[in-house]
Amino acid sequence: MGTILDDLLQANQRYVAGFHQGGLAMPPARKLAIVTCMDARVEPLSFLGLRLGDTHVIRNAGGRVTEDAIRSLAISERLLGTETILVIHHTDCGMLTFTNEQIRVRIKSDLGAAAHDAATRLDFLPFPDLAASVRDDVAAIKASPLIPDTIPVYGLIYDVRTGKLETVV
């Protein structure tokens, strides 16, 4: 029995056999960047009717607008022509289920004192209110001097049970 890597490499061989999109341009065709969660149930290309090459997708736990997300957005906008940004969080998000202190305690229990020490210097960016987290992240992008005021930034919530998007104002 093979490892998961073996299975994935075999799947890649099948993918390569039918791959015909190697000529796609580096800039996103729809001039769009999306910041969203890493949750496996969230697939923005599918629920937005997009295709490979249409958008930049920046993913992390919670779809939070971190310093690194701003870095990626600045590169996307300045060097690759992005003209619109979406922040998409989702229902039933794991980031709603814990606090910084709870994860730090778990890390200490599972990984020891050195890991806990490192965790105390990290904000894991959990949130208790889904819509407020979207508004906070949209505001963070709009407040960044690295993103021009002319770039529209929209906030949305994706419902993992129905597939529906809701705009957050």
Image (cartoon, rainbow, N blue to C red):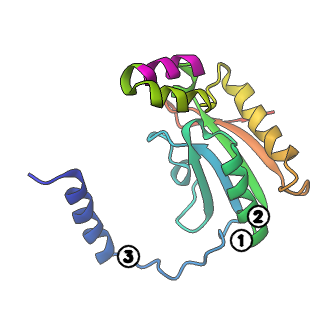
- Numbered disc 1: secondary structure: helix
User: Looking at numbered disc 1 in the image, what kind of residue is underneath it?
Assistant: Leu
Residue for point 79% across, 68% down: 78
Can residue 6 be found in the magenta stretch?
Answer: no
**How far, Cα to Cα, is label 2 from label 1?**
6 Å
Check disc 3 and report the residue beneath it: 19
- Left or right, 45 with respect to 83, comes to left
User: Looking at numbered disc 3 in the image, what kind of residue is underneath it?
Assistant: Phe
Looking at marks 3 and 1 on the same chain, the residue that comes earlier in the sequence is marked by 3
Residue for point 52% across, 66% down: 52
Residue for point 38% across, 76% down: 19
**Foreground pick, 139 / 116:** 116
Give x and y (percent) for residue 135: 78, 33
Magenta part of the protein: which range?
Answer: 99-108
Quadrant into which the C terminus falls: top right
State the mark number for residue 77: 2
Give x and y (percent) for residue 50: 57, 59
**How far, Cα to Cα, is label 3 from label 1?**
24 Å
- Left or right, 22 with respect to 59, comes to left
Can residue 103 be found in the magenta stretch?
Answer: yes
Give x and y (percent) for residue 86: 71, 48
Asked whether the viewer can see residue 12, the reply is: yes
User: Looking at numbered disc 2 in the image, what kind of residue is underneath it?
Assistant: Glu
Check disc 1 and report the residue beneath it: 80
Say which quarter of the image contains residue 75. Answer: bottom right
